[in-house]
Amino acid sequence: MTTYYLNGSLITKDSDITLNGMTYPYAWLEGTSPDVRASLGIEKTGDINYDVKYYWGINNPKILEDREESDNDGNPLYVQVFDPTIGPQGSMVDSEKRLVTKGLKTTCTAEVKSITNNLLKLTDYYIIRNEVESLEIPQDVVTYRAAVITESDRAVTAIAAVDSVDALIAVMSSLAWPTFPVTVVVEEELPDPRNLPE
């Protein structure tokens, strides 16, 4: 069965749809193209007209900044934790930590930092070897690590400065990580176990 959504909300079958002051019958949707639907904020099951990383639905972006959550009366909400001392089976209770919905700036910054850590891990061997054995770090490794950190710092700063989801998408699309250096690690040759003294 085909399902339609208006800005992420289900459109009830056979109901009229009001858009920009105009009312359309539900059957009208069947004759519309994906481009027309997208321009009106309507999506059909199977349509992919928005990036789910940044949007809840068409024209329905996720929040940029972290948000402390409150109930309908404006009272602050707190992270729930299990307290085994309440009742015979324990119960969930409020902690002292506010319930916070992470905004896109926070999640994208975390993504950049995770990529950074993973890229640096590829050459951590050289840093450890330098610390433990005082062996020189190859210059291409030094250059690579500096470039990773520079790109990470640039991206994190740019993310913090954006004021719209489109600007954030542009920053994340502009990530340009350096190419991993082709440095061959030559390990010490281990003795042949067949020649070891008994």
Image (tube, rainbow, N blue to C red):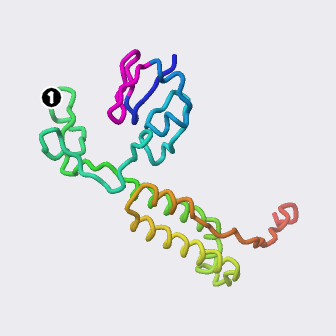
- Residue 86 falls in which quadrant of the image? top left
Q: Which residue lies at the image location 65% right of the left edge and 80% below the top edge?
A: 143
Q: In this view, does 109 lie above or below 8?
A: below
User: At which x and y percent is residue 171?
Assistant: 51, 63
Q: In this view, does 167 lie to the left or right of 138?
A: left
Q: Does the magenta segment cover residue 21?
A: yes
Q: Which residue lies at the image location 21% right of the left edge and 35% below the top edge?
A: 92
Q: Does the magenta segment cover residue 169?
A: no
Q: Is residue 4 left or right of residue 135?
A: left
User: At which x and y percent is residue 10?
Assistant: 39, 26
- The secondary element bearing badge 1 is classed as loop
Task: Name the quadrant of the C terminus.
Answer: bottom right
Label 1 neighbour load within 10 Å: few <14, some 14-19, many 20+: few
- Residue 57 falls in which quadrant of the image? top left
Furthest residue in direction right, as rendered: 195
Identify the residue position indicated by label 1 in the image: 87
Front residue of 92/190: it is 92
Q: Is residue 129 left or right of residue 98?
A: right
Q: Is residue 17 left or right of residue 183?
A: left
User: At which x and y percent is residue 193?
Assistant: 83, 62
Front residue of 74/178: it is 74
Front residue of 165/97: it is 165
Q: Which residue lies at the image location 67% right of the left edge and 81% below the top edge?
A: 137
Tell me, yes or no, if residue 63 can be seen here: yes
User: Tag count in the figure?
Assistant: 1
Q: Is residue 133 above or below residue 15?
A: below
Q: Which amino acid does label 1 sit on?
A: Gly
Q: Which residue lies at the image location 23% right of the left edge and 46% below the top edge?
A: 69
Give the magenta range.
10-26
User: At which x and y percent is residue 161?
Assistant: 39, 68
